[in-house]
Image: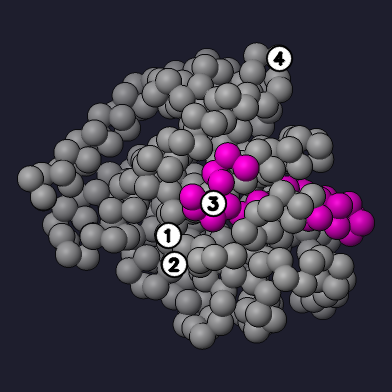
């Protein structure tokens, strides 16, 4: 790994063709969109990528494709860790490691699938670490599916002090927890990167190493501006942050299909098929297009406001 994994880290969505295969031409355009819009790194084969609905072969090829197309322009982290069986987990994580990723991300709930506690977590983690490449940087993700398992402070420090972990995708959705974790991991290689839009700006101001929430699929550049320039422009930062928090509430309207409708509008790719969301989101959420109209208009307004600061 050449540089730290930090900043704005989009959790990548996966475009599908009408025949339900991965749309690799659309994925190329999506990668370029992320890079043109402020991504400091990319998180591939994540929950937003619909990893639980991809075969191991698809997860393997998806990770390799992203790493290959990015070609070192930013770091790429890869997961695809979806199984509870330890031998299946080893296959999944080995496939992720073989993608050439800058880090392989382990999902916390699969290290303790029956919610038995720290000793189970510790034992399963030790078993995997013994078998994964010792020089492969690792990450942790408190993925909310099939259940959200937050790390205890003891578990966090076990990983941080091992020297093998370089990031935690924090899904605590709690600013006090983020602050405590940042303080605990000071002086270790492990960076705390918050994934909750409601606290994104406050968490970055408090020392979170970036943001990796689902709305990095809509306006990653606005989060990047907040991180780099928000404190110098508190009034505009407050307006941008208020817009971002409000916009992110629409995640409940059928994400990740919602993000695919957004990118269809942008022309990134043609299809909005989702394996995670099998229903027609426009039929279920009647005002969805009106909501997206407002998000797109608000995004343009915030960009204009930011541009006006340097005009």
Relative to 303, 271 lies left or right: right
Neighbour tally class for label 2: few under 14, some 14-19, many 20 plus, Cα within 10 Å? many
Q: Is the N terminus in the top left, top right, bottom left or bottom right quadrant?
A: bottom right
| Residue 40, x across and y down, in percent | 44, 54
User: On screen, 48 above or below 185?
Assistant: above
Cα–Cα span, label 2 and label 1? 6 Å
Closer to viewer: mark 4 or mark 3:
3
- Which span of residues is magenta-colored? 68-94
Q: Nearer the viewer, residue 96 or 14?
A: 96
Where residue 299 sits, quadrant-wise, is top left
Which residue, given by chain and number where applicable, does mark 1 sit on? 7
Q: Which mark is residue 176?
A: none
Q: Which mark is residue 72?
A: 3
Answer yes or no: do the residues labelled 2 and 1 have beta carbons within 8 Å? yes
Cα–Cα span, label 4 and label 3? 31 Å
Q: Is residue 130 visible?
A: yes
User: On screen, 293 above or below 85?
Assistant: above
Q: Considering only order in the chain, which callout, 1 or 3, is on the residue closer to the N terminus?
A: 1
User: On screen, 132 above or below 223?
Assistant: below
Closer to viewer: mark 2 or mark 3:
3
Q: Is the C terminus in the top left, top right, bottom left or bottom right quadrant?
A: top left
Q: Secondary structure at mark 1?
A: strand
């Amino acid at each position: 790994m050449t540089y730290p994994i930090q900043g704005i880290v989009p959790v990548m969505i996966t475009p599908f063709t009408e025949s339900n295969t991965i749309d690799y031409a659309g994925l190329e355009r999506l990668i370029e969109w992320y890079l043109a819009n402020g991504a400091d790194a990319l998180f591939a084969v994540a929950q937003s990528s619909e990893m639980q609905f991809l075969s191991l072969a698809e997860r393997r090829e998806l990770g390799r494709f992203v790493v290959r197309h990015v070609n070192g322009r930013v770091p790429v982290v890869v997961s695809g860790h979806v199984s509870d069986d330890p031998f299946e987990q080893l296959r999944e994580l080995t496939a992720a490691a073989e993608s050439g990723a800058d880090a392989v991300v382990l999902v916390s709930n699969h290290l303790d699938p029956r919610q038995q506690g720290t000793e189970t977590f510790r034992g399963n983690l030790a078993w995997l670490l013994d078998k994964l490449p010792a020089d492969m940087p690792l990450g942790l993700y408190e993925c909310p599916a099939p259940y959200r398992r937050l790390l205890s402070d003891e578990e966090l420090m076990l990983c941080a002090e091992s020297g093998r972990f370089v990031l935690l995708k924090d899904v605590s959705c709690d600013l006090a927890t983020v602050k405590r974790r940042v303080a605990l991991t000071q002086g270790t290689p492990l960076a705390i990167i918050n994934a909750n839009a409601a606290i994104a700006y406050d968490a970055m101001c408090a020392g979170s190493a970036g943001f990796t929430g689902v709305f990095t699929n809509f306006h990653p550049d606005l989060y990047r501006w907040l991180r780099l320039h928000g404190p110098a422009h508190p009034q505009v930062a407050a307006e941008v942050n208020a817009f971002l928090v409000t916009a992110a509430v629409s995640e409940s309207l059928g994400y990740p299909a919602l993000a695919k409708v957004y990118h269809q509008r942008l022309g990134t790719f043609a299809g909005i098929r989702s394996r995670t969301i099998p229903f027609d989101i426009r039929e279920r959420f009647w005002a969805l297009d009106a909501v997206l109209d407002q998000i797109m208009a608000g995004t343009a307004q915030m960009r204009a406001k930011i541009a006006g600061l340097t005009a």
